[in-house]
Image (cartoon, grey):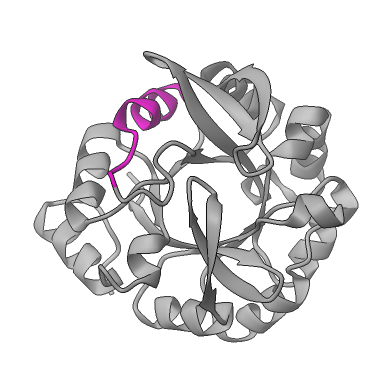
Amino acid sequence: MSNLRIIPRLDIKGKNLIKGVQLEGLRVMGDPQEFALNYYRAGADELVYMDIVASLYGRNNLSDIIRRAADQVFIPITVGGGIRSVDDARHILRSGADKVAINTAAIARPELIGEVARHFGSQAMVLSIEAKQVAQGKWEAYTDNGRERTGLDVLQWVQRGVEMGAGEILLTSVDREGTRKGFDIDLISQVSRLATVPVIASGGMGSIEDFLKVAESARPDGISMADTLHYKRVQLGDIRAAALKAGLAVRQV
């Protein structure tokens, strides 16, 4: 069994790290490089960067930020937002990313999933899914930071995405994101059971107890958090220590 990964998430607008609630109401937090270095030194297993205004520009604008990070941060980096083609993916990977996370373009043209996987390996192709609950036990995939409906059932989309070549799922609960009310356990549990590739849970962490609960109840392969780290409500070392004490399979640093 592979280790449960602890993954800080950095949402970027322009050159700034930002944070919002349910992917809206954005507040500038500071220089993403400072946060990335702090998280790396504190023992993060990976980092996720998301260009949250990429749809406005028509492409991902994080290459300079990723180059800076890759010079000093020696853990896997996933980059998402505005990646619409194999060429876009190549550009980001050459900038220093290890994986690309694709949402909107994959929904518009699912063949892109297989194209990226064939060119760079399935391990580099992360299917990013923004999920909103529409009924009990049912979620719809959204795009554009949770603003645009797609009509796609999340569980069906997970299954299709994996069949097309996605090597990992980055699953964000739009309902819980930034709320500090805990993860959507039901959503993450169902996706984790269904998917035959690693699942990263994102959206809702407000405490170490939330981390332990989703890890033990839903069994994702990684847990991503932003707000609780950016505002220093929780420290990465404390998360890891609590996870180890609870008997979870996390890396010892």
Which image quadrant: the N terminus? Answer: top left
Q: Nearer the viewer, residue 28 or 57?
A: 28
Q: Is residue 155 left or right of residue 175?
A: right
Residue farthest left in this picture: 245
For this view, does 197 lie left or right of residue 41? Answer: right
Along the viewing direction, whichever of 66 and 53 lies nearer the viewer: 53
> Which residue is outermost to the right?
87
- Please indicate, yes or no, whether residue 110 appears anywhere in the rendered image: no
Q: Nearer the viewer, residue 2 or 208?
A: 208
Q: Residue at x 51, y 85 (%)?
A: 34
Residues rendered magenta in the picture? 181-196
Compared to 109, does 5 lie above or below? below
Report the side of 189 relative to 165 (left or right).
Answer: left
How far across and down, in percent of the image, does residue 4 sit? 33, 51
Q: Is residue 167 above or below residue 32?
A: above
Which quarter of the picture shows residue 16? bottom right
